[in-house]
Amino acid sequence: MSVQEYLDKHMLSRKIEDAVNAAVRAKTPDPVLFISNHMRKAVPSVITKVKARQILDCRGIPTVEVDLYTNKGMFRASAPSGAPSGLYEAIELRDGDKGTYLGNGVTRAVRNVNEKISEAIVGMDPTLQNQIDQAMIDLDKTEKKGELGGNAILAVSMAACKAGAAEKEVPLYKHIADLSGRGNHVLPVPTFTLINGGKHAGNNLAIRDIMILPIGAKRFEEAMQMGSETYHHLKAVITEKYGAQGCNVGEDGGFSPNVSSFREGLDLVKEAINRTGYNGKIKIAIDVAATDFCIGTKYDLDYKSPNRSGQNFKSGEDMVEMYKELCKEYPIVSIEDPFDMEDWEQAKYFTGLGICQVVGDGLLMSNSKRIERAIHERACNALLLKVNQIGTVTEAIEVVKMAKDAEWGVVISQRSGETDDSFIADLAVGLATGQIKAGAPSRGERLAKYNQLIRIEEELGDQSSYVGDDWKQS
């Protein structure tokens, strides 16, 4: 083929002429760079390569990382990981070889990305998120993504979403807002973990987390300041009462002093808030994770104590009364998983009291069928969304819409096994959830999310909006 035939076949002369004319009109000082960028934009982007690898999350446990390539570049995402129950959530595919990473390796999931998912989605338009996610769901053919692995599918889905944003030349949160049909971008109230308990820490505290919400801040950056200052005041309070050893931290950065009762932990947080001078501007939330200490129909509040007497068992009715008292004594505005994941009756009754936001985590597991049931039965009034429990960006968008249509609150949540991927920060802004739970205001994998929200607020400038007192109505 001659040079002229090659030029004619690809219509290069016309394309180059168009690019040169555009450079002249723009009066660009660097015409070569302008022409290069102009011609790149003229080429529709497609997924050209997908490469996965095994990396470690913040707990030192393997997870899946994916590099997805288009002609716009390379886009990386990693799947967060929790302690999956396997009952209603997407399955994390692990190798099971006890001789390697204690059975937690994800080389099978990595291989599924490199050999199966890659073949299915190479050539697809990265802006068509729904089609990409559906192609992977169809390829898996199981209800809980157990064939390819929810960890494999999610990492690819997130990477594709980033590639789609780049193709449209918009920030990730704006692309997500477009995918969801929402035009408003709001900065969420951060739910900072201050004290870890339950299965997240080695102390005797039964409940999993005591958290704060800086709803009185005017901007997200101010909320970060309030959270950080309270965290450090709490460190001083704990040191004074328990010594430096009380400042050991749990899995998501909260302190884990050896408190044994709800009130003991809440008193520490209340004193820290008092020292900041932010009284009235900071509220408290608790993650009970009651399933962890439910035995039959009773709740063992001493389940972690080595010297337990066996007399601190409470019925569901006792738990309701305890929550009512705590909400009167402390500025608690949100309680997550106050009952066992199958205790629908108590959940319905407590939610009906209207005392506070009742967040469904184990109750829902980000599962659309469970969410639909909870909406119908009014078993909670807020969704805790963990993207790895549902498995794709598209499905996450769908369940958030379900929750918002029911006038629920929505909390975008971290997992105990996080990476430095800040995807959920953009997700919270793009879906205008109004709340994000990303752990303590410390540790790199937690701050990756919070710092990204600071950047987004700066980028939005005058168009930014921090939900503040309207945190449940965003």
Image (tube, rainbow, N blue to C red):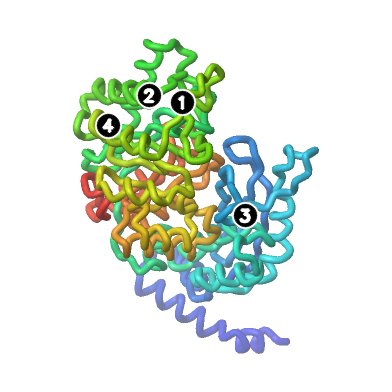
Residue 147's x, y, as percent? 69, 62
What residue would you read off at disc 1? Answer: 205
Callout 2: 10 Å neighbours few (<14), some, many (20+)? many
Pointer 4 residue: 325
The answer to whether the residue labelled 1 contacts the one labelled 2, judged by CB atoms less than 8 Å apart, is: yes
Q: Find the distance from the CA under tag 1 to the CA under tag 2.
A: 8 Å
Q: Position of residue 400 (x, y in %)?
A: 39, 60
Q: Residues within 10 Å of mark 4 (few under 14, many from 20)?
A: few
| Residue drawn at x 26%, y 30% as measured from the top left | 330
> Does the residue at mark 4 contact the one at mark 3 (Cβ under 8 Å)?
no
Q: Which mark, residue 242?
A: none
Q: Amino acid at mark 4?
A: Glu
Residue denoted by label 3: 91
Residue at 46% x, 60% y is: 396
- Is 170 left, or right, of 40 in this rendering? left
Residue designated by label 2:
265
Q: Are marks 1 and 3 in contact (CB under 8 Å)?
A: no
